[in-house]
């Protein structure tokens, strides 16, 4: 992938590992699995500043890359996986390069079938979710203004967005068949611009090829979530989302 797709520029092998006797203190200071729910103290404040908190976490990573490397190490990721993540080569949800390459190739084969069956023109596949940068951008998870809720591949889905021309028309056809289409607003930039992504409850109405793809790769990856987004000329994606190299 292009160098401008890096999460951050760092050579992981040059980052000094933590001494064994400092790991627990480091974990308590930098890592948090806290989750603030609606009604909890601080929930309303975080939600009202959600965009600022998301980008504050991204900015903290850029300024504290060495610390972040050790955060990922403490959570059990090896140096090769960390380097591949931060260099933009592959997210942390893939255990190795081989499974990532196989998934990318499978998406490439899916593209042609899905375009014919759903009558859309796929522009690109985008991967999102905590495994891309390694931390959750959800403002209600972890510490407010810095990354701390680290991804857990065994319990997190692989999230892929299919960006295509004709998605809105597809959604209307699916609704006419009586099936639910979910809407997911998503932050795109620092100004709070928000675009809409769609999820189809009954993917069989979209494409049998997609249905089979999801079933197969859910087994291989432990979880797979596909959403759709209509392509437009001024489309933007948050910096913690990455094109899938198909």
Image (cartoon, helix red, strand yellow):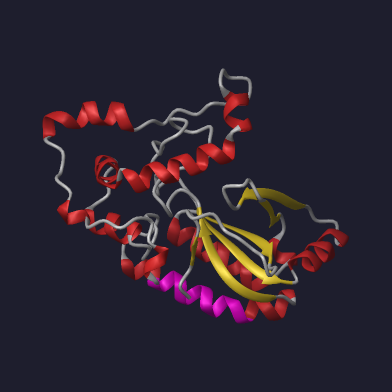
Toward the front, the furthest residue is 191
Image position, residue 2 (x, y; %): 40, 71
Q: To which quarter of the image does residue 152 belong? A: top left
Residue drawn at the location 22% of the way across and 58% of the way down: 11
Against 48, residue 54 (above or below) is: below
Against 134, residue 232 (above or below) is: below
**Marker count (numbered):** 0
Residue drawn at the location 15% of the way across and 38% of the way down: 18
Residue drawn at the location 56% of the way across and 62% of the way down: 215
Front-most of 42 and 60?
A: 60
Image position, residue 62 (x, y; %): 36, 48
Horizontal arrangement in the rendering, residue 116 relative to residue 71 (left or right): right
Image position, residue 149 (x, y; %): 41, 37
Front-most of 26 and 211?
A: 26
Horizontal arrangement in the rendering, residue 181 relative to residue 28 (left or right): right
Q: Is residue 104 magenta?
A: yes
Front-most of 161 and 218?
A: 161
Image position, residue 206 (x, y; %): 72, 67
Toward the right, the furthest residue is 176
Helix, strand or loop: magenta stretch: helix
Against 98, residue 200 (above or below) is: above
Q: To which quarter of the image does residue 89 belong? A: bottom left
Toward the top, the furthest residue is 41
Residue drawn at the location 31% of the way across and 61% of the way down: 84
The answer to whether residue 92 is visible is yes
Q: Quadrant of the N terminus?
A: bottom left
Start and end of the magenta stretch? Answer: 101-112
The answer to whether residue 137 is visible is no
């Amino acid at each position: 992938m292009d160098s401008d797709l890096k999460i951050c520029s760092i050579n992981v092998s040059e980052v000094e590992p933590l001494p064994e006797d400092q790991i627990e203190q480091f974990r308590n200071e930098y890592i948090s699995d806290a989750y603030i729910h609606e009604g909890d103290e601080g929930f309303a404040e975080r939600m009202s500043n959600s965009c600022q908190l998301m980008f504050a976490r991204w900015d903290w990573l850029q300024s504290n890359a060495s610390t972040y490397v050790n955060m990922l190490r403490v959570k059990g990721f090896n140096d090769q996986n960390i380097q591949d993540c931060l260099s933009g080569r592959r997210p942390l949800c893939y255990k190795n390069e081989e499974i990532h390459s196989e998934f990318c190739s499978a998406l490439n084969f899916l593209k042609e079938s899905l375009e014919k069956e759903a009558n859309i023109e796929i522009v690109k596949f985008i991967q999102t979710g905590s495994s891309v940068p390694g931390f959750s951008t959800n403002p209600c998870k972890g510490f407010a203004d810095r990354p701390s809720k680290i991804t857990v591949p065994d319990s997190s889905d692989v999230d892929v967005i299919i960006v295509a021309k004709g998605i809105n028309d597809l959604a209307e056809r699916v609704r006419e068949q009586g099936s639910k289409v979910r809407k997911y607003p998503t932050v795109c930039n620092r100004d709070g611009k928000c675009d809409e992504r769609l999820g189809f409850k009954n993917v069989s109405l979209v494409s049998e090829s997609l249905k089979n793809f999801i079933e197969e790769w859910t087994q291989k990856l432990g979880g797979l979530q596909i959403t759709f987004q209509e392509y437009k000329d001024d489309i933007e994606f948050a910096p913690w989302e990455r094109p899938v190299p198909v």
